[in-house]
Image: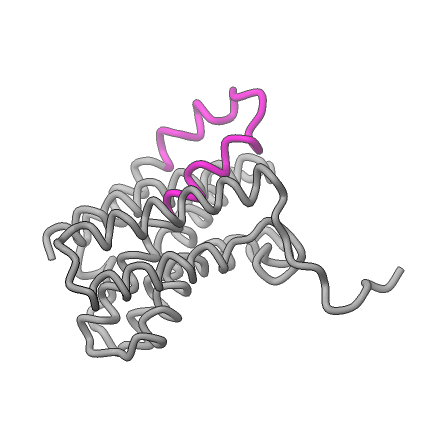
Amino acid sequence: MDLIVTLEFLAVIVSAIYGILLATRAGMDIVGCITLAFAAAFGGGTLRDLFLDRHPLFWIANPHYPVTAFLICLILPFYAKHLPKIKPLIIYPDALAMALYTAIGTAIALEHQSSWFIAVILGTITGTFGGVIADVICNEIPSIFKPSPLCATCAFSGAWVYVLGSAAQLPSPLPMVTSILLVTVLRILAVTFNWTYQPLRPSRP
């Protein structure tokens, strides 16, 4: 459990950075940065905890999480706004945060006696829905719901790696590390090579 807590804290930091970069790209002010940082860092895990009836919510049980995210919001924007190209940087915290939260969410779901499939679904939600909420705040269709580089598929695959690795009783922390590496690499490759699904029907002109 100590490993999960450590990785969760790292996920909060990385997700907050992702939210700030997203807000900077959208031209938001400091309030927007804080909002997107909190949405990205806590959105998916909050949904997971609500579905599992897990209380208090993870960021309430660990009050240093929101404090850390808030402090990052006060510092990073003053540097991020000077970066000439924000968009190319977003993929790295995005991929790592998704990977960390996917593995953590899957592990927590299994600890709560969820079935394999439910654990994978909750891991995927944990890994992706912070970004979904952030996209909605930016008034954009979430990228996982439209033809765009694979996102939920990467998390879904990584969650299964964790579940099957745990079921095979691989030595800890091998399932966790393997899951994180797989999701991170898949997501970066998907963006780099534009791996997408085709729309079910052509969009209207």
Residue 54, image quadrant = bottom left
Q: Is residue 203 left or right of residue 14?
A: right
Principal secondary structure, stretch drawn in magenta: helix
Q: Residue at x 63, y 53 (%)?
A: 196
> Any magenta on residue 80?
yes
Q: Is residue 119 above or below residue 91?
A: below
- Write the residue at 30% across / 46% down: 11
Classify residue 141 by image quadrant. Answer: bottom right
- Judge whether 205 appears above or below 115 on screen: above
Give coordinates of residue 93: x percent, y percent: 41, 39
Q: Which residues are magenta?
A: 73-97
Q: Nearer the viewer, residue 28 or 83?
A: 83
Tell me where residue 200 sits by quadrant. Answer: bottom right
In the image, what residue occupies the spot 40% across and 38% down?
17
Is 203 in the magenta?
A: no
Colouring rule applied to residues: one colour
Q: Residue furthest front?
A: 168
Is 60 left, or right, of 197 in this rendering?
Answer: left
**46 on left or right of 82:** left
**Quarter occupied by the N terminus:** bottom left
In the foreground, 61 or 168: 168
Coordinates of residue 152 in the picture (x, y in percent): 49, 59
Q: Which residue occupies the extreme right position in the image?
A: 205
Residue 36: give x, y in percent of width and height. Answer: 46, 48
Q: Residue at x 29, y 70 (%)?
A: 49
